[in-house]
Image (cartoon, helix red, strand yellow):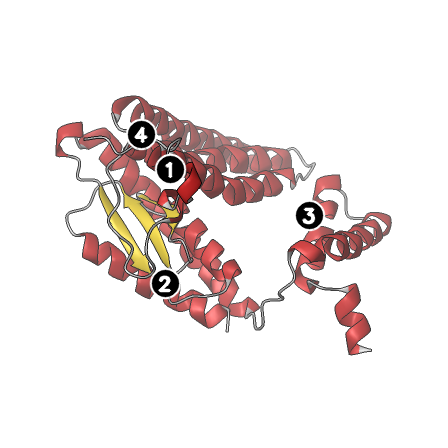
Amino acid sequence: MSFEIIGTYAVALLLLIGAGFVIVGVIGLLKFNDPMTRLHAPTKVGTVGIGALLLASMLYSFVQGEGSLHEMLIMAFLFVTAPISAHFIAKVSIHMRTCETPPAPPQDTTWSTLDVAEEDREIAPQEQG
Amino acid sequence: MTRFYNWLLPHPLLTLLLAVVWTLLQNDVSAGMVVFGVILGIIIPRMTSIWWPDLPKGFHIGKMFSYCLIVMWDILVANIQVAWIVLSVPNAKLKPAWIAVPLKLRQPEAITLLAGTITLTPGTVSCDLSNEGHSLLVHVLHTDDPDAVLEDIKTRYERRLEEIFV
């Protein structure tokens, strides 16, 4: 009996932690005013937020006596895909020149997003200011 | 025999991973599901090996495991730091910065892991590679000392990845 009570409290605590981190992520998304800084809030705070929610779900099913490991997979897929979407959003904002121009790379000539082929220069977005 | 083995299992770890993922997806560990997972784990890497021709030479699983633990701990700490920055630092005082990391790593798998780690950890997002893949562009949310962050990335993650992929 006491096992179930402790389990229920742990699940509730994890749900609260998860919800807290998710709401901080949303606040960050609304508060920051530049696409690059805005990118930071959901990619970071989202991982632990959703991680805690999934952990709560896993713990709940174990307390109920029917183990579930699907959540591990969701977490793994999330950790693999989140950096890729963040990377692409960042590349788009570099390409559209909506952020500060990055400094030159220490090795090689330029960043791959700025490395536009000669024949495409005319249709590429131009430097602002 | 070795050549046949290499032909059948171009990526042994990928085979193992696919079998485990398949069993987890079924949410039930039974002999039939494991066997089917192994079959999938052999067929899929075989069919896709054209697009992933170069086998990473050496790979230390033990070191990879401790690396994962370090990264997970960093993600936790990072999240609390970023949450604090989001809630307490006003937009005008925020000091975002670009960092250009010169890479010592050369294997694409290792660079991918490094970039993924950087995106998942404290207030940093990996944004771009240089045109020949020897530098990584990182955006930092809030820092007073970009050089310290660069040093941190190099000593904490890149050095460990160099030991994992030899």
Residue drawn at x 39%, y 32% is A42
Q: Can I make out residue B27 in this image?
A: no
**Hey, which residue is sitting farthest top in the picture?**
A30
Disc 2 from disc 1: Cα separation = 28 Å
Say yes or no: labels 2 and 3 on the same chain. Answer: yes
Q: How far apart are marks 1 and 3 (CA)?
A: 45 Å
Instruction: Kindly give the residue lying farthest to the bottom in the view shown.
Output: B1
Could you tell me the amino acid type at mark 4?
Pro
Please tell me whether mark 1 sits on a helix, a strand or a loop: loop
Residue type of the residue flagged with mark 3: Val
Mark number for residue A121?
1
Asked if residue A84 lies left or right of residue B28, the reply is left
Closer to us: mark 4 or mark 3? 4
Give the labeled residue for mark 3.
B21
Q: Mark 4 points at which residue?
A: A35
**Secondary structure beneath label 4:** helix
Of B96 and A42, the residue lying toward us: B96
Element on which disc 3 rests: helix
Residue A48: image location, x then y, percent: 43, 39
Image spot of residue A43 (x, y percent): 40, 36
| Amino acid tagged 2 | Leu
Q: Which chain carries label 1?
A: A
- Under tag 2, what secondary structure? loop
Q: Which residue sits at x=38%, y=33%?
A: A124
User: Residue at the spot x=83%, y=50% of the render?
Assistant: B36
